[in-house]
Amino acid sequence: MSARKSEHSRKKEKIVSDRVNRLSPSGIRKFFDLLASIEGVISLGVGEPDFATPWHISEAAVRSLERGYTMYTSNSGMPELREETARYLKDKYNIKYEPSGEILITVGVSEAMDLAMRAILNPGDEVIMPDPHYVAYDSCVILAGGEPVLVPTSQENNFEVEAKDIEARITDKTRAILIGYPANPTGAVMSRKKLLAIADVAKRHNLLVVSDEIYARLVYGVEHTCFASLPGVRENTILLGGFSKAYAMTGWRIGYAVAPKEIITAMTKIHQYTIMSAPTMAQVAAIEALKTGESSVMEMVEDYDRRRKIIVKGLGDIGLSCFEPKGAFYAFPSIAVTGMTSEDFSEKLLMEEKVAVVPGSAFGDCGEGYVRCCYATSLADIEEALTRMKRFVKKYSK
Amino acid sequence: MLKDVLRILENDARTTTKQIATMTGTPVAEVTKLIKQAEKDKLILKYKTIVNWDRIEDDQVWAIIEVKVAPEPEAGFDSIASRIAQFGQVRSLYLASGTYDLLLVVMGKSERQVADFVSENLAHIEGVKGTVTHFVLKRYKVDGEILEGGEGVKRQPVIL
Ligand SMILES: Cc1ncc(COP(=O)(O)O)c(C=O)c1O
């Protein structure tokens, strides 16, 4: 029996490609399976809005189905959506992109990230990115045959990545810099000044910058700087944006990439063979979101901001010191007082107090010693989670 | 600042002063003062709860009543409206544009009671020219809250 089993697993190793085997085994996967099996858990683990999509946006999609919009669209997306996206970027950041040729509508930023990496990387090319970072970043690079190169960031620097630290890691093989601010998991926002320094490095070394700005609209008391809007970087920048977070549309699977024509043409090539076109009803909903969604976004941002303040203060009060996250919907407190690893902390907290947070180590070595708490959940749940965590931290504080 | 506090309370009257203080970055004492003043100024009229009575009892009858009135030369619609507003059965009262003047939302224990209110009370008020009563068959949404079928957020336990 056991002999057969090991034979089976050897075979399995061969079945799965080396590339996939290299992807970090998702430690949080088992953790979330565990979560799903326990009753009464308050989850600060999920990284998505707790709002339903504003109804006027959903309505537009329902109407489109009734009118028979159930076919593929053009590979690069409906012309109207590309035009609206261009208009939006012009209005918001004063950057100009051609709706035909420089904008590609994708299945979320997820697909856009994958396309970007596959379009620009040759085997062994290096992509420099901050640590900790969103879990898909290094995976997308590896799947595209590239090598992620990590730049440590820390709470002392508000988890902002420094241009000089990026520059120190540039080699002959470096192809691109990948940044994502406002950041998952830290909630960090980059100042314009620091982004300018990165722009300068990118220009001097002729590197591409892939900027994941999915959380661009979720900033609190600060302005989001769109990387592509910085002087002189347009030709080097692939800007990824989406609807998931700002408009509470995670399940629709819709986003976009904008970049100079040569890059978008390459990305569209891959997209047309692997995806065809983004979901049509989601494209219709996205048009509606861009046209009339502004006030909904503002309402949601106001609401997140209130909860953000409650959770940051609450975490501080119970001894989990937390730098002020100015964007996204995550708080990233240090759990140093407990002396536990972030995985231990998260697992014990789940088992003993039924509160789910995500271990910071899931996002890179520099996330060790922190946990990610998503505050896109009801105020009552946040308060209850804080009460439970207080008990927990008191019990385990050194 | 005051508007922020009012919006927070309007959304959830049970938000504590301490929570509001944190949310708005204002000292607790100042929030307390603001709320006290707003209550005194009748900016805040009352703290209430939205109850879905339909689920526990059925002796509530709601009606929407259109009322045509002859405005008074001096006071216009206001004096008639303020008389009608005195009745406890009248839950809401608006002056509306269109084919009628006042719009009432009335609650009674039975259709009989609502009918009596119209014929005994409303019709006798001087200046009331005519009424049209619509009985409510079902309430779907009250004060911004969907009563049934609002199942809330359907989040799956995903990660990222
Ligand atoms: C930083 C970051 N980028 C991209 C995504 C994926 O976005 P989309 O839903 O547009 O694929 C997420 C989702 O959690 C995210 O946190």
Image (tube, rainbow, N blue to C red):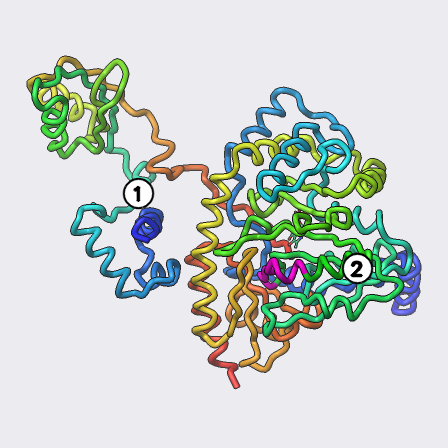
Q: Amino acid at mark 2?
A: Arg
Q: Which residue is mark 2?
A: A204
Q: Which residue is mark 1?
A: B51
The residue most toward the bottom is A398
Give the alpha-carbon distance from disc 1 to disc 2, as whole Å. Answer: 64 Å
> Callout 2 environment at 10 Å: few (<14), some (14 to 19), or many (20+)?
few
Q: Based on the displayed image, in which of its 4 quarters is residue A317 positioned?
A: bottom left
**Closer to the camera: disc 1 or disc 2?**
2
Residue A153 part of the magenta segment? no
Look at the image and tell me in which quarter the N terminus of chain A lies.
Answer: bottom right
Above/below status of A243 relative to A67: below
Mark 2 sits near ligand 1, with its Cβ under 8 Å away: no
Mark 1 sits near ligand 1, with its Cβ under 8 Å away: no
Q: Nearer the viewer, residue A108 or B133?
A: A108
Q: Nearer the viewer, residue A398 or B21?
A: B21
Residue A195 part of the magenta segment? yes
**Residue A225, percent from left and from top:** 60, 52
Q: Nearer the viewer, residue A206 or A307?
A: A206
Q: Amino acid at mark 1?
A: Val
Please give the label number shown on residue A25.
none
SS category of the residue bearing label 1: loop
Q: How many marks?
A: 2
The residue depicted at 68 percent of the width and 67 percent of the height is: A162
Q: Is residue A27 left or right of residue A5?
A: left
